[in-house]
Amino acid sequence: MSEKVRYLKDVVIISVSTLFVKMRGLILVALLTKSLGAETYGLWVQIAITLSLAASLSEINLHNSLIRYAAGETEKYKISGVFWTNFTMVFVISLFTASLLLIFSEQASFLTFGKSGRDDYIRLMCPLIIIMSLNALTNAFFRAVHSTLWFAFYYTLTAVLDLSCIALAI
């Protein structure tokens, strides 16, 4: 397959996948605003923002180093070494971040929500921090090894599962 055809195919696959993921956001906003009240929707937004912030801090941008160093490699053991090194670092840092958040959940609840009675939400975010950090690393791995089809499948699948779990929870 020529380079232009492969590039065009990759662009179409990623574009369709991104379209589905963006539609997830539109469906999610409609679903949440209809099902939840204004206060609960605001709480949802604060949880999502806090979770994104904590996950991005625990990633420490190692997913970009994975793309940089693994994309040019052709030997599988070198790619594997770069991946598992980054995986271990991200896992340990996100585990540390989640542990700190779990230990100081009451104080984090007061800082985030203005009340200390909602520390259960902070405790529920702890495993999600680890999952979201490793999710970004997995996406970067698929990009680094030029596995566009698997990347698009995984990207779309996580969005569909996310939306399904939220719909079932509401």
Image (cartoon, grey):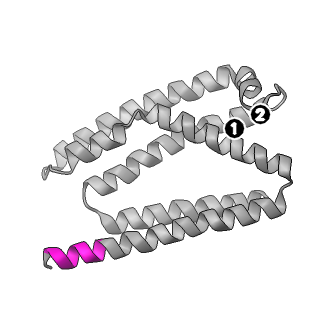
**Where residue 151 sits: x, y (%)?**
37, 62
Give the labeled residue for mark 2: 120
Q: Nearer the viewer, residue 83 or 136?
A: 136
Residue visible at 52% across and 44% down in the picture: 132
Q: Is residue 73 left or right of residue 100?
A: left
Amino acid carrying label 2: it is Asp
Q: Nearer the viewer, residue 154 or 33?
A: 33
**Where residue 21 sits: x, y (%)?**
53, 65
**Where residue 33 sits: x, y (%)?**
79, 60
Residue 124, numbered circle: 1
| Magenta highlight on residue 9 | yes
Q: Secondary structure at mark 1?
A: helix
Residue visible at 34% across and 69% down in the picture: 149
Q: Quadrant of the C terminus?
A: bottom right
Q: Quadrant of the N terminus?
A: bottom left
10 Å crowding of disc 1: few (<14), some (14-19), many (20+):
some
Q: Nearer the viewer, residue 138 or 2?
A: 2
Residue 22, numbered circle: none
Amino acid carrying label 1: it is Leu
Residue visible at 82% across and 48% down in the picture: 40
Residue visible at 23% across and 72% down in the picture: 7
Q: Which is the main secondary structure of the residues drawn in magenta?
A: helix
10 Å crowding of disc 2: few (<14), some (14-19), many (20+):
few
Residue span colored magenta = 3-10
